[in-house]
Amino acid sequence: MVQSTQIKVMSLTEAYKDILQVVKRTASSEIKNREFAILAEVSHINSKVYGGCQYIRSVGDDDSELQLVVPVEIAAALETKHFYEFSGSFEVSSSPNFGFFQFRVSHAILQGANMKLEAKKQAANEIIEKGYLDKYKDDFSRLRGKEKCRVALVTSQQSQVIRDVQEVFKQHRGIAYDLIPVKLSVSSVIAEGIASAAGGGYDVIMIVRGGGNENDFNVFNESNVVKAIYDSQVPVIVGIGHTDNNTFADKAADRSETTPSKAARYLVDMLGVPAPINHRPSDQRRRYANRSYIPPQNQVQTFKKSQAGSMVILTAIIAMLIIAVGIAIFVFVPKLFETILTSQ
């Protein structure tokens, strides 16, 4: 029987600190020997000085946070809401509250105010300069009357808008769609999904997502997403929830709608209502269809009866004409003779 050893119970924070010390002892020197240059925006400057350095909070372009250990003389020149190129090395953090690693800065070079805004400007310049917005826009006219349509639905696998799109697609039985699952917060993954759909033999690509705050839609301004739309030979419909169609993805797409449901509705309307399986008969066909079946022998009898009835009616008419002529002769001829004799 294996005898269990007594394990000291501690808080999660204490356990993290303990394991951080182990990492420091085993890998600290190797980590420090690797130099990096990173771009980060200063979000908070701690005025307190510890060992000639100040602890500064920074944010990367993907909103990841990193604590910087900055010498006082360098920290004095830093400003919040400005981003810098920081040179230095990583080291194991002293507290898990600030992440497992921190960055010890040796140099800092100012790059500009508001890193995200600057990144947007650079992406916009690239998109415009490379002509990604000059794509020929497909008018989807070739889809009119098409009975079957294969759609690649590029969105998150957990997105609630899938059901909304499905409900609209049900109005046209010829639409079949495949989900191209992507992470809607990562531009490279979205771009890969679009490229995959473009080579999948689909008739239409639809990029959809639900509502959110403005930052959630920044990914659709990234140059790699816009380039993927531009490169696609398959027409692209973008339906981003509750936006004013201001993203570059909207502008590059062949068609842009403000919600996923509207994007699906546009496709259904372009395809048109398919002819029903059982076509409705014309008025003439419907009249014949509503007549009961009469066997051939009964049809002959009916015809004979109809012919006999017609003969009776014709005979009656002739008899009436003869009687009328007889009355006319009986009344008018004597008067005619009387008139002739009187005149003589």
Image (tube, helix red, strand yellow):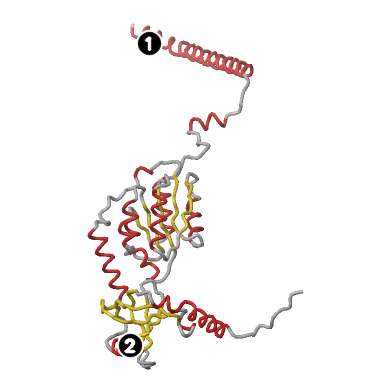
Q: Residues within 10 Å of mark 1 (few under 14, many from 20)?
A: few
Considering depth in this image, is 21 or 155 the residue closer to the camera?
A: 21
Count of labels shown?
Answer: 2
Question: How many residues crowd mark 2 within 10 Å: few (<14), some (14–19), many (20+)?
Answer: some
Residue 70: x, y in percent? 34, 85
Dividing the picture into quarters, in which one does residue 256 lie?
A: bottom left
Residue at 27% across, 50% down: 136
Where residue 71 is drawn, which disc sits there?
2
Instruction: State left or right for residue 39 relative to residue 159.
Output: left
Helix or strand or loop: what does disc 2 sit on?
Answer: strand
- How far apart, in angstroms, are the residues tagged by discs 1 and 2? 151 Å
Residue shown at the point (63%, 20%) measured from the top left? 295
Residue 227: x %, y % from top left? 32, 56
Which mark identifies residue 339? 1
Q: Secondary structure at mark 1?
A: helix
Viewport quadrant of the C terminus: top left
**Residue in view at x 38 percent, y 43 percent:** 144
> Residue 281 at what x, y percent from top left?
50, 34
235 sits left or right of 175 in the view: left
Name of the residue lying farthest toward the left: 129
> Is residue 318 toward the left or the right of residue 47 in the image?
right
Q: Is residue 122 above or below residue 66?
A: above
Up the image or down, 338 lies above or below 252; here it is above
The N terminus sits in image quarter: bottom right
When asked about the image quadrant of residue 134, the answer is: bottom left
- Of badges 1 and 2, the one in the foreground is 2
Q: Of the numbered discs in the image, which one, if any, rests on residue 6?
A: none
The kind of residue on which mark 2 rests is: Pro
In the image, what residue type sits under mark 1? Thr
Counting residues from the start of the chain, the first of labels 1 and 2 encountered is 2
Decide which of 138, 18 is in the foreground and name it: 18
Q: Position of residue 270 (x, y in %)?
A: 39, 47
